[in-house]
């Protein structure tokens, strides 16, 4: 499960085109040394990207000035290579765990600040794979709820206030349908309009009756058919024949003349004709005239005249105009009351057409009556055409009668409108109307479809919230066991790292963004919060070394809880950054313990002593490899690293240099050898007399101190040793700039130098 080698590094970070790594196999323990800025972090990031499959981590490190994207190949024994090309890995390697600055920034803090995201990431770190799966389920449910919220906001915005009025979307969409809502809205509008026009309503009259006078056709026909039954038919025929001979108006003329003579019963038979002065008794027509122009005759004429007058009184003069005014008033009243009462008919009366039918009937009747007036004793009847005009008019008259009856019935509603308007509450009626309008709007398009979408989404959100709560409960049960154990493990590592603090109250908290880990720092038995407004907090109580130590403890503790730890490839990038020196040995020891439990460990650092310590403490029975990132032109490359050579200390190198000069001599190394003598003495004295020769102490003051203590209980060196040390010092000072301005040109005698070399090594062996 381990990485074999880096076959190719191209166009990423400091690496231009590195294929030399293909010749550098990785071991179960692989050390990578590099000076700062050479590419350690790039390698760690590449391995992090390989683990997560996040290609952006590599793509964003494309080599500056490169025209091509990064191209990387890792090989593993017995497996297909892992290739990064075109911004993605051919396959990821998820069992890689990386400790680097990114781990610290993600799980602990950014600089000195702890943010919500750090606690969320730490929460996953504590949970382990099982808990992460539970937490991932929870976070997915939370994300689903948030998506529902976003969708609900969109669907809420799609139902604007202009559609729902003052109601919230929930209240608006909850309005129940009302099949009769349209009619109720119309009624409410009428009630509200009436309330607002209460004064005008009280002044407005109800509908007045509408009527057209009738024509009594049977009565007219009876009058037209009347004659004088007592008048003999032969006499009537003679009289009428005579009238015919007299010409037009003859009957009237004779009728007037008969008024000039008296009746025979009055004894005036001696009367003479008023026209011709002849005697009348001898005229056979006089008796016939007297019968013809009797009282019954006068009554008939009077009835005919009365009928004509009656027709003119009822159907002519101002009567038609009055009817038109009544229709116009009814129409205006209809327009007024239609706004306030239901069922008010529209007045659609064609008074012109009525007038034409009315005139036709009236003229037909008058023509018949006038014909009767001309020949009263002649039986007449209304013509078929006259009857038809009367029938046509009667249809219109009945329509007006029916309309009037309907209007009179509406007067009851009008009275109710007047009564209701007098005591109406305009505000309440308006609220009722608006509510009804909202009900109609709610169940009309597009509101109906929008509310359906909103309610469907809300129902889906409720279901998702239930699933979220179930996932949270499952995670909570798991966390009750995990978090206390993790706190114990972290504090155990902090103790082993010689940290002056521990953590307390490690617990999980639920928030809107999901779940997060919370804890505090305990220093001198005093709890310090992660964040605080003024006063002690994480940011001002922990040093950079403390923060890095805490991060390393988090990392090691999380690995301890990994059930698949034996298959892990652990990558540790510069764990000694900002660590105090007294934690270095402990860190090396813990890494040795971890190395024995994982598949492979890759350690990157800029500190040779630290890497040498790791190398020296590792099991030599396992495969080990050491690689150095070296400068190549303006970039970097990978080369093999001879750890054993770098394991030689500077003191060892100087000692070997002096010993070699004693044996072989030679001008090539004589000045370097001469310069090495004083540092050899200083290194010896620091080890032999640590209490009297601390760091930064000089030979001169040390010799002075030794002379002061000669012969005392605190004697450091004997007088002979002091004399020898001073001689060695004086010789060595000739070749150092702080004691001889001409140190680079000081003359060296081989015999003299060889002697001082022997004396220096001999003194350091005492």
Image: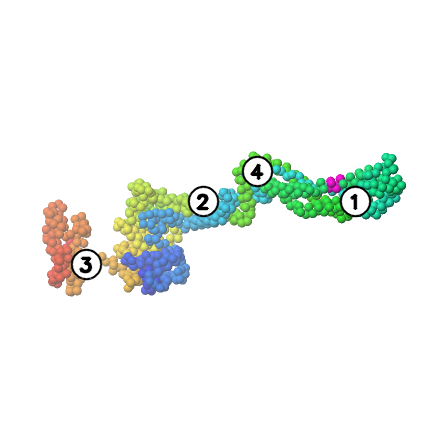
Residue 172 lies, in percent from the top left, at: 52, 44
Label whose residue precedes the other's in the sequence (1 or 3) = 1
Q: Secondary structure at mark 4?
A: helix
**Residue 326 seen in the current view:** yes
Report the residue marked by disc 3: 654
Q: Say the numbered circle drawn on residue 473.
A: 2
Please tell me which residue lies in front, 242 or 25.
242
Distance from disc 2 to disc 4, alpha carbons, whole Å, reads 69 Å
Report the residue marked by disc 4: 200
Say above or below: 672 vs 513: below
Label 3: how many residues lie within 10 Å, few (<14), some (14-19) or many (20+)?
some
Which residue occupies 36% across, 48% down? 118
Q: Which residues are magenta?
A: 306-311
Tell me if residue 587 is in the magenta stretch: no
Q: Are marks 2 and 1 in contact (CB under 8 Å)?
A: no
Label whose residue precedes the other's in the sequence (2 or 3) = 2
Q: Say the numbered circle drawn on residue 286.
A: none
Label whose residue precedes the other's in the sequence (1 or 4) = 4
Distance from disc 2 to disc 3, alpha carbons, whole Å, reads 67 Å
Q: Nearer the viewer, mark 2 or mark 3?
A: 2
């Amino acid at each position: 499960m381990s990485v074999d080698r880096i076959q190719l590094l191209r166009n990423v970070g400091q690496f231009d085109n590195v294929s030399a790594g293909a010749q550098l196999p990785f071991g179960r323990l692989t050390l990578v040394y590099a000076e700062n800025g050479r590419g350690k972090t790039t390698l760690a990031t590449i391995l992090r990207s390989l683990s997560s499959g996040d290609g952006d981590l590599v793509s964003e490190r494309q080599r500056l000035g490169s025209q091509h994207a990064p191209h990387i190949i890792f090989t593993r024994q017995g497996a297909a290579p892992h290739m990064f090309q075109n911004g993605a890995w051919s396959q990821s390697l998820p069992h890689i765990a990386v400790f680097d600055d990114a781990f610290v920034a993600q799980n602990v803090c950014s600089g000195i600040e702890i943010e919500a995201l750090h606690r969320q990431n730490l929460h996953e770190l504590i949970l382990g794979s099982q808990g992460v799966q539970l937490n991932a389920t929870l976070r997915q449910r939370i994300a689903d709820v948030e998506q529902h919220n976003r969708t609900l906001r969109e669907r809420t915005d799609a139902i604007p206030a202009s559609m729902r009025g003052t109601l919230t979307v929930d209240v608006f969409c909850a309005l129940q349908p009302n099949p009769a809502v349209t009619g109720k809205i119309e009624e409410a509008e009428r009630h509200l309009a009436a309330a607002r026009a209460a004064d005008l309503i009280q002044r407005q009259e109800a509908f007045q009756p509408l009527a057209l006078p009738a024509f009594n056709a049977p009565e007219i026909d009876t009058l037209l058919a009347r004659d004088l039954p007592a008048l003999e038919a032969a006499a009537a025929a003679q009289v009428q024949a005579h009238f015919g001979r007299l010409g037009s108006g003859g009957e009237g003329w004779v009728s007037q003349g008969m008024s000039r003579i008296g009746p025979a019963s009055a004894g005036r038979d001696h009367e003479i004709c008023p026209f011709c002065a002849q005697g009348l008794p001898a005229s056979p027509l006089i008796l016939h005239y007297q019968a013809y122009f009797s009282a019954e005759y006068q009554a008939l004429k009077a009835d005919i005249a009365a009928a004509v007058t009656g027709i003119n009184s009822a159907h002519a003069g101002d009567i038609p105009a009055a009817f038109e005014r009544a229709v116009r008033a009814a129409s205006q009243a209809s327009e007024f009351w239609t706004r306030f009462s239901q069922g008010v008919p529209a007045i659609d009366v064609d008074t012109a057409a009525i007038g034409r039918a009315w005139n036709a009937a009236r003229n037909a009747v008058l023509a018949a009556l006038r014909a009767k007036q001309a020949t009263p004793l002649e039986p007449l009847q209304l013509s078929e055409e006259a009857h038809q005009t009367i029938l046509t008019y009667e249809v219109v008259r009945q329509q007006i009668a029916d309309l009037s009856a309907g209007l009179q019935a509406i007067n009851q509603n009008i009275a109710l409108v007047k009564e209701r308007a007098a005591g109406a509450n305009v505000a309440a009626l308006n609220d009722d109307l608006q509510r009804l309008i909202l009900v109609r709007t709610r169940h009309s398009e597009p509101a109906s479809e929008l509310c359906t979408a909103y309610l469907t989404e809300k129902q889906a959100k409720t279901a998702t919230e239930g699933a979220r709560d179930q996932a949270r409960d499952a995670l909570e049960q798991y966390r009750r066991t995990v978090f206390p154990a993790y706190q114990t493990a972290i504090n155990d590592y902090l103790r082993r790292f010689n940290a002056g603090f521990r953590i307390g109250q490690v617990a999980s908290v639920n928030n809107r963004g999901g779940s997060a880990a919370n804890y505090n720092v305990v220093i001198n038995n005093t709890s310090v919060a992660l964040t605080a407004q003024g006063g002690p907090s994480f940011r001002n109580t922990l040093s950079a070394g403390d923060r890095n130590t805490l991060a390393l403890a988090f990392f090691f503790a999380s690995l301890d809880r990994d059930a698949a730890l034996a298959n892990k490839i652990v990558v540790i990038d510069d764990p000694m950054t900002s660590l105090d020196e007294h934690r270095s040995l402990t860190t090396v020891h813990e890494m040795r313990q971890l190395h024995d439990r994982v598949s492979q460990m890759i350690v990157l650092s800029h500190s040779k002593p630290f890497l040498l310590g790791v190398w020296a403490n590792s099991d030599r029975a396992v495969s080990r490899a050491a690689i150095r990132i070296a400068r190549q032109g303006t970039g970097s490359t990978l080369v093999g690293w001879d750890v054993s050579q770098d394991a030689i200390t500077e003191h060892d190198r100087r000692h070997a240099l002096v010993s070699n000069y004693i044996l072989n001599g030679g001008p090539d190394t004589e000045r370097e050898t001469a310069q090495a003598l004083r540092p050899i003495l200083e290194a010896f004295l620091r080890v032999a007399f640590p209490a009297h020769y601390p760091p930064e102490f000089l030979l001169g003051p040390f010799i002075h101190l030794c002379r002061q203590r000669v012969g005392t209980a605190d004697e450091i060196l004997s007088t002979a040793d002091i004399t020898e040390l001073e001689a060695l010092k004086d010789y060595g000072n000739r070749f150092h700039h702080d004691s001889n301005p001409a140190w680079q040109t000081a003359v060296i005698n081989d015999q003299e130098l060889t002697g001082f070399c022997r004396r220096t090594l001999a003194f350091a062996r005492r």
